[in-house]
Image (tube, grey):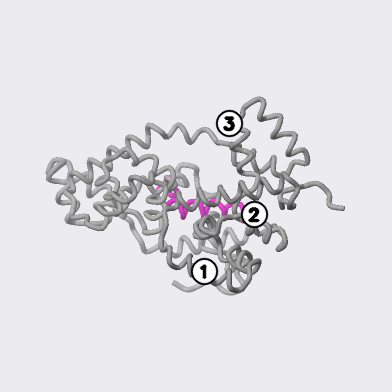
Amino acid sequence: MSQLPATSPAALLSGAQKCAILLLVLEEAQASAMLAGMSPAEVQQVGEAMLTVAEIDPLAIDHVLDEFLARTAQVAALDSQGRQVRQRLGLALGTPRAETMIEKIGPPAAGRRFAVLDWVDPAGLAQLIADEHPQAVAVVLAHLPEDRAAATLDALPEDLQPDVATRLATLLPVNIHDLAALEADLELKLKGVGTNRDSAQLAGTDFAAAVIKKARGRGALLEALMGVNPGLAAELESQQFIFEDLLGLSQKDMQLVLREVDPGLLAVALKGASPALKGFIFGAMSKRAAAQLQDELAERGPMKRSEVDTAQRDLCRIVRRLGDAGALTLPTATEAML
């Protein structure tokens, strides 16, 4: 098909924008059917593109429609999604035999296993499958793209992760009927929790901690909250200074912290530090001490995330104690400096 001339108002539009224009001019039912056939990523791209074409030259719309008609003029789609194939085989052969035949035919007749999970974020997916047998969890992960599988594995309970990883590495072919049953069970579970998506969480402890962190009356607010809800006050107070906030200390204050912190604790905490924070801490030390710490980090090897998090929290408590005592200035303080 010939390309649009460079002078066309639609020539500079992206594919997502052209699709957005088409969806906006179609009838609602037709647009809905098109969106239903898209992946979550495609829906997001087109949805964002709709906002960019809300006000557009009518001539560009005409050109997009002309291009669409030209591309589809010689195409007749009988069953591009394989739905009719599945229905016909199911009626003719019965469900068990049809499923076996559809699996042998392959896509698009067979469809893609666990495609319904594309709409669930990794954290939500981990929560959905965490109570399944580890073998079933491994099967689900094996059907995900690598990035989503890794993020979902990270979000699973820590005690479950090694078992799932082992099963994932040694996974054998799975009976197609067992796959279909697992997929159906997960779809039912997903429908059962689907109503949760009707409610949006607007705040939470992370948001509250961030707000308190920027408030001028932070100390008084936390003290008052301690009298109302000590547990919540302690949780919010612990988030007032996090490990990466060490970057906001002066070099002099960082040197004070290093004198107060046990070297072993510091080595564990640094396992989870960003390169920028490691460089800042090494820069606040003598060359000899920095070299020794770097050697210790290399010798320790991989460590559990929970151990690193605990060490970082302990170090932050020391920094907060020094700040409360006036020995150093916390970077979270909002009072004016004189």
- Dot 3 or dot 2: first in sequence order is 3
- Closer to viewer: mark 1 or mark 3: 1
Q: Is residue 109 left or right of residue 13?
A: left
- Element on which disc 2 rests: helix
Q: Is residue 59 above or below residue 208?
A: below
What residue lies at 84% left-to-right and 52% top-to-bottom? 337
What residue lies at 60% left-to-right and 69% top-to-bottom? 8
Q: Mark 3: which amino acid?
A: Gly
Location of residue 261 in the rendering, given as x and y in whole percent from the top left corner: 59, 55
Q: Is residue 83 above or below residue 5?
A: above
Name the residue nearer the viewer: 149 or 304: 304
Residue, far top:
228
The tag on residue 245 is: 2
**Disc 2/disc 1 C-alpha distance (Å):** 21 Å
Quarter-wise, where is residue 245 in the image?
bottom right
For mark 1, what is the residue? 294
Q: Quadrant of the N terminus?
A: bottom left
Name the residue nearer the viewer: 255 or 129: 255
- Dot 2 or dot 1: first in sequence order is 2
The tag on residue 231 is: 3
- In the rendered image, residue 11 lying in the magenta stretch gets the answer no
**Mark 2 and mark 1 residues within 8 Å of each other at the beta carbon:** no
Q: Which residues are magenta?
A: 33-53
Name the residue nearer the viewer: 235 or 121: 235
Name the residue nearer the viewer: 13 or 300: 300
- Can residue 65 be seen here? The reply is no
What residue lies at 60% left-to-right and 67% top-to-bottom? 282
- Dot 1 or dot 3: first in sequence order is 3
**Disc 3/disc 2 C-alpha distance (Å):** 23 Å
- In the rendered image, residue 48 lying in the magenta stretch gets the answer yes
Q: Is residue 335 above or below residue 280?
A: above
Q: Mark 1: which amino acid?
A: Gln
